[in-house]
Image (cartoon, rainbow, N blue to C red):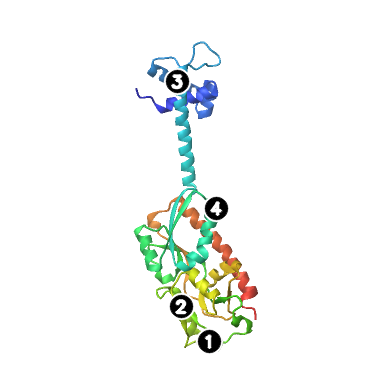
Amino acid sequence: MKIDPRHLEILAAIVDGGGLTEGASALGKSQPSVSRSLTMLEQRLGVKLFEPNRRPLQPTEFCLSLAAEGRRILEAGQTAGQLANRFRSGQTGAVRIAGTPVFMDGVVSPRIAAFQSGHPDVRIDQSYGYVPEVIEGLTKGTVDLGILPIRAEEIPDHLVFTEILKGRNVIACRVGHPLNGRGSVKVADIAEFPWIAPPANSPLYHDLRAVLAGIGVQNFKIAFTGGSLSTVINLLTGSDALTVLPYSVVFTLRRQNALDTLSIRIGDPDRHLGILSNPELGQRPVISRFARFIEIEFKSLANLILRREQNELWRP
C-alpha cells in the first residue's frame, strides 16, 4: 500500500503538537484542511488513528509508528530546505579559479584562506595559467573565474573583466640588501648585482626586461630563471640578487620581514589585476559570493598599498 508522504507529515505534526489546531499551526495550514487530510488517511488505512472520544487526542500504537515515519519525512524536508537555502546564498558549493602563479601564491591564496574560514563548506579548486590558458578554460566552462593581470585588448568580447588592483611593479631584494644602505640608488649600482628572472613565458619576465631597458641597464647578469614564487623568495633572502615583482606581492609578504624594495621608480605594466568571468555560462551563487569577497578584499588591499606608497616607498 502506498501512502501519501504529506499525510504522514500531517500526522506527525498532530501527534507532536497534541491536537489538530497545534498540528495545523506547526505546518502553516488551516485546521479544516488538516482534519480532512487525517480523515483521508484513516479511510485509506481503514482504521482509526486516534482513540475515540478521548480529549486531548490519544494516538494509537499504529498511529505512533506512522507518526515516526512522518517525522523523518518532515526532518528530511527541513534538512533539504536548509541545504537549498545555503546553496542559494552561496554558502556551499565549489569554485574553480585559475590565474598566474605569482599572483595566486602571493596575494590571492591568503584571501582564499580568509574566505574559507568563514565559508567552511565551500571548496576552491585552483589551477595555474596565463592569459591564453585562463581564457580557454573560461570559454570551455572548465574554469569559473580567472584572477590574473591582463591588458584591455586581450579581453575577448564574450568575457567580462572586473579590475581589482592597478598594475605596479617594484625591484625587490632582501631586507638589509647593500643597495638599501647607500641612500640614492643609481643605475650603475643596480648593474653590479645578479638578477632572478621569472619563467620565460611569464608576463613578469617581459616586465623585467622592459624595466631594465627603461632605466638604462644594458648589461646585466641573470643568476636564476624559472621557479615558483617561494623559490624566488628563498633565492632573494639568501643572496644579494634582485628581481622585479608586483608590489602587491611584496606588500603582502611584509609580515615575514624578509623582502624589501629599492627606492627607485620603474615603469608600471600596462596590465591590471582583475576577475575574468564568462556570463554566458551563468554563475552559481557561491561563485558570485566568492567574487564579491575578492573584490572587497582587494579594494582594502589597494587602499593599504596606496597609503604605504605615499608615506614610505618613494620618500627621499
SS at mark 4 in the image: helix
SS at mark 2 in the image: strand
Q: Quadrant of residue 199?
A: bottom left
Residue that carries the numbered disc 2 in the rendered image:
224
Residue type (three-letter) at the residue carrying disc 2: Phe
Residue that carries the numbered disc 3 in the rendered image:
38
Q: Taking the image as drawn, is residue 50 in sight?
A: yes
Q: Which of the pair 113/285 is nearer the observer? A: 113
CA separation, marks 3 and 1? 91 Å
Residue that carries the numbered disc 4 in the rendered image:
117
Closer to the camera: disc 3 or disc 1? 1
CA separation, marks 4 and 1? 45 Å
Find residue 192 and name its label: 1
CA separation, marks 2 and 4? 37 Å
Q: Residue at x 63, y 74 (%)?
A: 310
Q: Where residue 35 sits in the image (x, y, percent)?
A: 47, 20
Of the image marks 1 and 2, the number of the one nearer the N terminus? 1
